[in-house]
Image: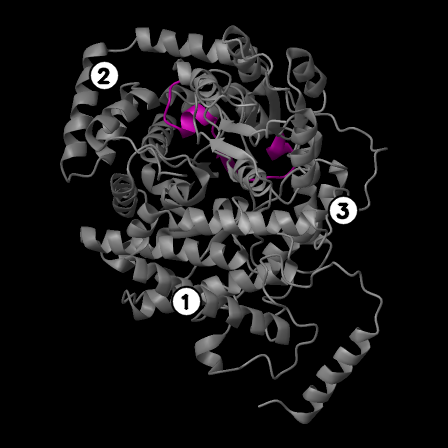
Amino acid sequence: MASRTSTDAQERFEREFAEAPVRPTITFDSISGEKTKGLYTWDDADPGDPDEKLGFPGQFPFTRGVHANLYRGKLWTMRQFAGFGTAEDTNQRYQFLFSKGQRDLSVAFDLPTLMGLDSDDHRSIGEVGRLGVAVDTVDDMERIFQGIDLNQVSTSMTINAPAAIVLAYYLVAAERQGVPWKNVRGTCQNDILKEFHAQNEFVFPPQESVRLVVDTIEFCAQHVPKFNPVSISGYHIREAGASAIEELAFTLADGFEYVEQSLARGLAVDDFAPRLSFFFIAHNDFFEEIAKYRAARRIWARRLRDRYGAKNEASMKLRFHAQTSGAALQAQQPQVNLMRVAYQAMAAVLGGCQSLHTNSMDETLALPSEHAVTLALRTQQVLAYETGVANTVDPLGGSYFIEALTDRMEQAAEEIFEHIDELGGVMKAIETGYFRRVIADSAYRYQREVDRKERIIVGVNDFVDNQVPPVDLLKIDIETERMQVARLKDRKAKRDQAKVKECLSRISDVAKSKENLMPTLIEAARAQVSVGEVVIALAGAFGRYAGVPGG
Amino acid sequence: MVKSRPPRVVLSKVGLDGHDRGVKIVARALRDAGMEVIYTGLWQTPERVIRAVADEDADVLGISILSGAHMTLVPILIDLLRQEGLGDVLFLVGGIIPEEDIPKLHEMGVSHVFIPGVSLDNIVTFIREHLPART
């Protein structure tokens, strides 16, 4: 029930606001189109049962964070996503990032690798080494980490359709360094479901794709215990145009699907759930983003405990990586992107992220230059060491606005889960095109708001400035493609061909069975079988997926 | 006077780039503006794109590239357009295109390059003002 004083305060707010000279077109809705009030009071923040709803940091339901001591004991991992050109170019960029204070790695692969094509495939023309590093065989993987001790660093790898193959390469690269698998730390993105919703880097049909994911979950639970086999990602869903609520709900729904399919495999929830990790965006709408992370943790914890019967608290803890939004960056006045990134990064930290990538100011124009990537990393260092925001865990907990927004996000996500259930679950909803339709609608709504100037984007639809100093951009050497193709051809010519053939035929057999594919993929990695060759063998058994009509 | 048909636009993603947020928004905006839009979907080869332009008797071809492969793919598309006698089709490129590449793309025969931040109305207006005359 509203108290008299807060009702009075609301009335005063409205009265004063009615007389204020605001721009006629501008909207106060959140970036996601959610109605936002101008004033929140204790009447908006329903405390419910405080133990069930908020708890304390490091305690169920982890609304306030997964660690009792968040950043004082250990700062978030500053993990800049990087990769371009050949393995050597990428290795050099990593050495550069280490010299600037980064400690862990995040590998960006080029489009052919992401799509499971070899560099010498005709479809790879123009794309080799361009958006990330080209990896054709385990040799490339080994070269990326030349002089980098895989005992010491944790490595995140953004790879999806061919993730199981690339993970096999990574494990063999570790093996060649003499690093036991039980010490290997890192994360494979390996979230194929969001590829069908948004990112479009799928190869095999949905069900076969998820089977591969479950193979890696099972294999890592048994042999690579410190590795996160999946990073369930909202980032790409949001970048494709979804609202914050849709990002939250679709990502968690995907997470539930992986849990259910792993349970169906016969795995015990507490054996694999502690290693499921998440990846969310950090977008412009500061408080909405913070509420999103807090709601995500609460929803996940409750679902894992209440529906999936998790007993181990580690299974209930939603740990996440955050990356600032690429689509929120602008090509006009690129230096202004530095400020956008800084605020987005602060939202991620106030929301309790475990690791963070800050985008570089020049990424609407090209892959980041050394100068731009240094500033992006420095942004995190300023945040960590100068602003004081990392000193206190969940500093916004108890804010009327934040708690009301967290509740709202949770409730809206639950409504979407119900709708997905009505459609017959995630796999069915993919077939109907549900996710893609919702995302495209939201993207269009947002663009129209910008065009109508309901939302001001500095330098784009207001505060336009044509006298901006240019930024120096990174150029990818056109020689890269030729070199990589030549190297791959040479490698293919100098292998034990009988062994390669045997591996490929074994992959095809295992793919058709219910056996876990990982041991066979690792054998193929050791035998220098290329990504493209493995994918062709798998596609022979699984088929290829062309997407839903009307895409 | 013969009533002219609405402008017919083929929009496409060439190569391996899966970023389709922009192209889908543009497709919808052009449709809302009364144009006939054929969106080919992802992962098209240059040959298939040009086939679509010919089959649909399109006035406009819009290519979306966010992968950086534009300097490789655009010349191939232009050559094919000319070979097919479709050199008068209004050829537009949208995506992540560094400024220094824009004049080069114009020289190759691209009519306009739309970079991030352009308004949908600008795209609609540009097409209306630059439509090739129908013979």
The answer as to whether the residues below labels 1 and 3 share one chain is yes
Answer yes or no: do the residues labelled 3 and 2 have beta carbons within 8 Å?
no
**The residue tagged with tag 1: helix, strand or loop?**
helix
Residue at image mark 1: A414
Earlier-in-chain disc, 3 versus 2 = 3
Q: Is residue A284 left or right of residue A467?
A: left
Q: Quadrant where the C terminus of chain A lies?
A: top left
The vertical placement of A395 against A400, above or below, is above
Q: Nearer the viewer, mark 1 or mark 2?
A: 1
Q: Amino acid at mark 3?
A: Val
Q: Quadrant where the N terminus of chain A lies?
A: bottom right
Q: Amino acid at mark 1?
A: Glu
Q: Position of residue B103 (x, y in %)?
A: 72, 17
The vertical placement of A158 against A312, above or below, is above
Instruction: Please report the bounds of the magenta region as a residue range.
Output: A96-118
Mark 1 Cα-neighbour bin, 10 Å: few <14, some 14–19, many ≥20 = some
Q: Cα distance, mark 3 to mark 2? A: 55 Å
Query: What colour scheme does the image use?
Result: one colour
Q: Quadrant of residue A525?
A: top left
Q: Position of residue B125 (x, y in %)?
A: 69, 34
Q: Which mark is residue A500?
A: 2
The vertical placement of A205 against B113, above or below, is below
Could you tell me which residue is drawn at 41 percent across and 18 percent down? A123
The answer as to whether the residues below labels 3 and 2 share one chain is yes
**The residue tagged with tag 2: helix, strand or loop?**
helix
Mark 3 Cα-neighbour bin, 10 Å: few <14, some 14–19, many ≥20 = some
Residue at image mark 3: A458
Taking the view exactly as shown, the residue that stands out farthest to the front is B1
Q: Quadrant of residue A193?
A: top left
